[in-house]
Amino acid sequence: MRIEPTGTASLATRLAPTALTPLRWTLTALTVAGKFSPITTRRIFAVTSCADGYAAPFAPPPGTQRIPVTVDERFRGEWLWRDHSLEKIREAGSAILYIHGGAFITCGLNTHRRLAAKIGRSANMPVLNIAYRQLPHAHITDTVDDCVSAYRYLLDEGFPAHRIILAGDSVGGGLTFLTAMRARRHGMPMPAGIVALSPFGDLENTHRRAHPNAGRDAYIPTEALGVIARWGFRRDNTLDPSWSPINGDFTNLPPVLIQVGSTEILLSDAERLAQRCAEAKVRCTLQIWDRAPHAFQAAWDLLPEARTAINSIATFAIRQAHDNLASGSTGSTVGNVCDGQPLAS
């Protein structure tokens, strides 16, 4: 793997931590409140699961059409594309399955519609945006089931696996890996590529606590995911290692693009996921953006780095889904990026 020097963050990105301070205080308070009490944590889960409704007024980019679809009776989905016709979507021939973030307890179609649609428009590919089941109503194993069901839906709709991109941010970024691994175990063909934005990789918090970025993240407390895993997912007081993508089998996964900020707490997870790809000879590009906040791509209308990053995602998606480079690719590239272009291997 190779790490190259990074450029300097824009003024807007350097000011982002200040703007995000109130959110950090809120998340820190919720994390502290839930750290020692499963009852309090479950109440927090119940409240945060309602947050997606408040994001309903957020509009996708102009010209984006929404088509609600029944992907599976257990969860909702929607197509995001420039046309209202399902027939036109199928004619596109390729698709992006977008798996939103939200720490397994919040967010959904409304919160991530703008980002998913922007990525799709940039790549000129329709996007299937899904609202998988979350805590407190579903375990992570149920969440992965939903993601695999959505992938199967795309295959059943006639989209070839080598024309499908799995993409997601935060826990959604980690779920892209788990989805591909579970699909492979079910004998399903691999997708064309994986795009993971600030991905979580490990439900255990040990590596994040020891990472230099512990305490440096613009708004995510280091202990946040640990609290969720402790009270949300443990069974018989243990976490099954297979629930964390970092412990999965990376053999023969498709090419991977990972984007993450240089001061994020999830830089630890991104680096380890890239290392696992390298060990399995899976082609992986890790882009580390100077001082960019967690999932900064969502602020594409405010941060120049976000727009450049989305263009880089589009380039990767087009290359993998349309140029048929999804198979037979080996090697790994790791680098710090300031201009959004994948580093040469």
Image (cartoon, helix red, strand yellow):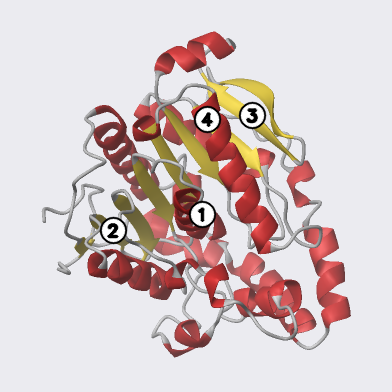
**Are the residues flagged by discs 4 and 3 in contact, CB closer than 8 Å?**
no
Work out whether residue 123 or residue 12 is closer to the camera in this orientation and state it: 123
Work out whether residue 18 or residue 158 is closer to the camera in this orientation and state it: 158
Q: CA distance from mark 1 to mark 3?
A: 23 Å
Q: Is residue 3 left or right of residue 150?
A: left
**Are the residues flagged by discs 1 and 3 in contact, CB closer than 8 Å?**
no
Going from N to C along the chain, the mark reached first, 1 or 4, is: 4
Give the residue type that dot 2 points to: Gln
Q: Is residue 190 above or below residue 85?
A: below
Q: Which residue is mark 1?
A: 182
Other-residue count near label 4 (Cα within 10 Å), few / some / many at <14 / 14–19 / ≥20? many
Going from N to C along the chain, the mark reached first, 4 or 3, is: 3
Furthest-front residue in view?
A: 187
Give the residue type that dot 1 points to: Arg
Q: Nearer the viewer, mark 1 or mark 4?
A: 1
Quarter assignment of residue 72: top right
Q: Position of residue 53 (x, y in %)?
A: 78, 42
Q: Is residue 306 left or right of residue 341?
A: right
Taking the spot 63% from the left edge, 51% from the top edge, the residue there is 145
**Are the residues flagged by discs 2 and 1 in contact, CB closer than 8 Å?**
no
Other-residue count near label 3 (Cα within 10 Å), few / some / many at <14 / 14–19 / ≥20? some
Does the image show residue 241?
Answer: yes
Q: Nearer the viewer, mark 2 or mark 4?
A: 4
Q: Which residue is mark 2?
A: 287
Give the residue type that dot 3 points to: Glu
Q: CA distance from mark 1 to mark 4?
A: 16 Å
Taking the spot 28% from the left edge, 40% from the top edge, the residue there is 316
Q: Nearer the viewer, mark 2 or mark 3?
A: 3
Taking the spot 37% from the left edge, 66% from the top edge, the residue there is 291
Q: Which residue is mark 3?
A: 78
Going from N to C along the chain, the mark reached first, 2 or 4, is: 4
